[in-house]
Amino acid sequence: MSVDTRALAAEALAEIALRGASLREVMERSAPKLADSRDRALLMALLSDGARWWLRFDAALDLLLDKPLRRKEPAVHALLVLGLVQLEILQLQDYAAVAATVEAARALRRPQLAGLVNAVLRRWQRERETLLTRLDADPQARHAHPAWLAATLARDWPERAEAVMAADNQEPPLMLRANRRRIERDALIERLRAAGHDAQAHAWLRDAIALPHSTDVTRLPGFAEGAFAVQDGAAQVAADLAELRDGQRVLDACAAPGGKTCHLLERAAVELTALELDPARAARIGQNLDRLGLEAQVLIGDASTPRAWWNEQRYERILVDAPCSATGVLRRRPDVRLHRREQDIAALSTLQRRIVSGLWPLLARGGRLIYVTCSVLRAENEALIDFLLEATVDARVLPFTLPVGQAAGHGWQILPGDGDLDGMYYAVLEKI
Ligand SMILES: C[S@@+](CC[C@H](N)C(=O)[O-])C[C@H]1O[C@@H](n2cnc3c(N)ncnc32)[C@H](O)[C@@H]1O
């Protein structure tokens, strides 16, 4: 019997939103149950938009249901959220969306709830305007961001918070990085266009190519031979700021899955050590290096305790792409907003401080430490650099500007949507 895509999506979304599972892991488990690639694409759209909009439509169900279903019938609850997502976000035809969602309740073996699913979605359609006004009055439901995050954004970026949350709710473009060791960017753009893709060179990033929609990248010309990698443009700034020269010793201290490691190696013939705490994630560095035809020493270790893995030779460049809240990449990782907790920020900030203070002594005089996060929160960014400057006597800030974003403390903040990029923070320190 064929699997009902919406029923499968509802079970998967309940795991993500109510039991803390990651979207990626659930998608990897669920997608193989669907034979047709269009069904798999619908599953991905339902899970991405279901997670992205959960906090809005979950709140809508509190207005629509007398008794909440979250605990007793989590899959049906998630199915109702998905019904609203289909009507409001995916803009599927009303009749098809409602009928298919009611059918999915039966596929979940809940025929007794099919009538309720139908009634709730019909009521939404009848009372839509009033319900939308009520949802917009609640800060959490308005932008589908957790209340603590909406409040932190409003405090950190009072003039930009609304635009940041709106950008978090958009589908991001697909961005590639041409592997200049294998192909010129223009030549790759020609190959992509010949295959029918609307590929455009990025205006100011040297290796970046934008495509308007996500697609199965393994089918793009050049994938198997390592002509490109998938990487948002904001992440490609790291290699520019490193200003590498051949022969330099470089440490990429929080390296997995190796996106920035590979970009650094594509730019110059450096001697690179890629350090990563998580062994499973470290394995992905090796896979990326192999596909792109690059070489580095991959080490498993804790960046905050170098004594365990350092060979006493200082580095001329250290990239610290620190573990962070990922609040700059919510548009690409829609489940993060459901799993991140306010108290995580203080714990992350402590970890970031331990990592940079552990690594600073490993930097050679005249060398650069590039600090990066995909966070938009000041506690993880400006405050970290202030901390390091206070804790050391031999650090000097190297100021720089980028075509998009804004100065933030001693560094630079790209907010989500600035130049259609992910949110990312950069600061560069030199050892004097
Ligand atoms: C933001 S991700 C790095 C992304 C990577 N630089 C890229 O461009 O593909 C941060 C990484 O740091 C790792 N990490 C966390 N704590 C660490 C520690 N104490 N030492 C080294 N790596 C750590 C995480 O497992 C994660 O893979």
Image: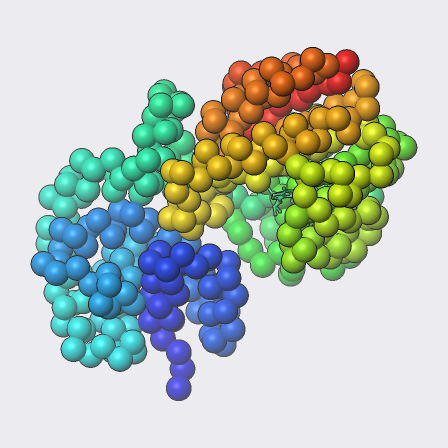
In this picture, residue 310 sits left or right of residue 48: right
Q: Position of residue 363 (x, y in %)?
A: 77, 26
Vertical relation: 37 (above or below) 151: below
Closer-to-camera residue (224/189) = 224
Vertical relation: 165 (above or below) 282: above
**Does the image show residue 258?**
no
Which of the 4 image quadrants contains residue 150?
top left
User: Seen from this angle, which residue lies furthest right?
Assistant: 247
Q: Residue at x 17, y 73 (%)?
A: 113
Which of the 4 image quadrants contains residue 200?
top right
Q: Position of residue 333 (x, y in %)?
A: 48, 48
In this picture, residue 134 sits left or right of residue 205: left
In this picture, residue 259 sits left or right of residue 215: right
In this picture, residue 54 sits left or right of residue 294: left
**Does the image show residue 25?**
yes
Vertical relation: 343 (above or below) 294: above
Q: Residue at x 33, y 66 (%)?
A: 10
Colour scheme shown: rainbow
Give the mark count.
0
Q: Which quarter of the rendered picture does the N terminus lie within?
A: bottom left
Q: Residue at x 53, y 21 (%)?
A: 382
Q: Quadrant of ligand 1?
A: top right
Q: Residue at x 72, y 44 (%)?
A: 275
Closer-to-camera residue (405/410) = 410
